[in-house]
Amino acid sequence: MSRVYNFSAGPATLPVDVLEQAKAEMLDWQGTGMSVMEMSHRGKAFVSIAEDATARLRRLLNVPDNYSVLFLQGGAAGQFAGVPLNLMGSNPKADYIVTGNWGKKAIKEAAKYGQPNKAASSEDTTFTTIPGRNSWQLTDDAAFVHYTPNETIQGVEFQDTPDVGGVPLVADMSSNFLSRPVDVSKYGVIYAGAQKNAGPAGITMVIVRNDLMGKPQSGCPMILDYQQQADADSMLNTPACYAWYMCGLTFAWLENQGGLDAIEAINKRKAAKLYDFIDASDFYSNPVETSVRSRMNVPFLLADDNLNADFLAQAEAADLTTLKGHRSVGGMRASIYNAMPESGVDALIDFMQTFEKKNG
Ligand code: PMP
């Protein structure tokens, strides 16, 4: 068996221990004589898998009792609609902070259901900064404030939770979920697609404060209705059973690493190594303002774009894959989520050094 270092932005690399356990349990999950893929979602075995995963996620994030934890389908993009459908039941106004492509998509979708206000945007800096909190033009009576703590494409990350007073704060945490501790009590809703830090694609976690549920718009589809899903333990219809199980294994792996404080320390070290190397080089550069650089997604440019194809081909030959940057920013992007071992970052830096020597 040979595994590469996979720097994909998502679906992304998973911990080998998690894949090994899934492999060991594939044909016969704990004496049931069947794989998790073949079980009824209403049966005792799968219900125990779902409950275990949910309990682990609650423990990892210290989710307060007055919040529900949902495992839904439709991706984070589904929640671009789910949030307004649930939270704009009686008030169509909401503020959006746009710091990258995903925030742009979120506000566009919200406009189908209400009147979102772009309260701040860093598009004038091609999303390489985060507008200072005092520049945000917040509405007095907004139903919520939405932001994207980590913009996956631009590699821009909020380092702290913004203060928006008493208005419910909604976060699309897809690409830095579970990479650092978070005070859930500061949020109204947190949502995240699994396929970066939490498991495989196909399942989306929504953590929602209970008082925000139960007042959806009349057209809200039942499968996006937070209250109905909470009442049904996220099984209003058939859930993404196998993805849910894989998330549970990933949560257990995270607990074994020492939880979110421990993984944060590792993530800080990995990101610092890579940024320090890029900053010290005249050949590579990262366009993002230093104070808001992402620990998860590290975009970088080569001094000469004509070398991009060679860089990617040689990286691939060195078992360093999926380093091509998003087409909207060009260059390269190394996604270094929880499951990317430090040895992967070291191998990437070694490769970049050698490439620079040959071409710089
Ligand atoms: N938000 C962010 C920050 C993302 O990175 C992504 C996926 N890359 C999405 C939303 C969309 O997620 P999904 O494909 O699960 O709908």
Image: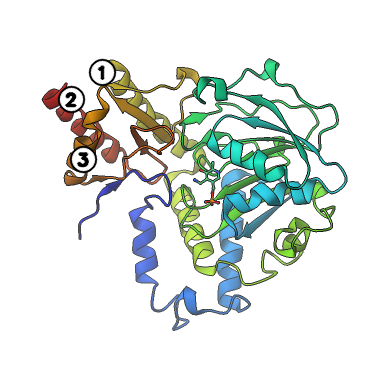
| Few, some or many residues within 10 Å of mark 3 (<14, 14–19, 20+) | some
Q: Secondary structure at mark 1?
A: loop
Q: Secondary structure at mark 3?
A: helix
* Mark 1 lies on residue: 281
Q: How many marks?
A: 3
Q: How is the image coloured?
A: rainbow
Left or right of residue 236: residue 297: left
Q: Position of residue 317 (x, y in %)?
A: 16, 45
Residue plotted at (80% across, 47% down): 212
* Residue 356, disc: 2
Decide: marks 1, 2 in contact (CB < 8 A)? yes
Q: Is mark 3 within 8 Å of ligand 1?
A: no
Q: Position of residue 5 (x, y in %)?
A: 27, 46
Judge whether residue 232 can be spotted in this image: yes
Left or right of residue 205: residue 268: left
Label 2 – label 3 distance at C-alpha:
12 Å
Label 1 – label 2 distance at C-alpha:
9 Å
Left or right of residue 270: residue 160: right
Q: Which image quadrant is residue 73 in? A: bottom right
Q: Is residue 214 above or below residue 44?
A: above
Residue plotted at (40% across, 35% down): 266
Which amino acid is tagged 2? Glu
Lower sequence index among marks 1 and 2: 1
* Mark 3 lies on residue: 315
Lower sequence index among marks 1 and 3: 1
Q: Residue furthest left?
A: 358
Which amino acid is tagged 3? Ala
Label 1 – label 3 distance at C-alpha:
18 Å
Judge whether residue 66 can be spotted in this image: no
Residue plotted at (38% across, 53% down): 14
Q: Which quadrant of the figure contains the N terminus?
A: bottom left
Which amino acid is tagged 1? Ser
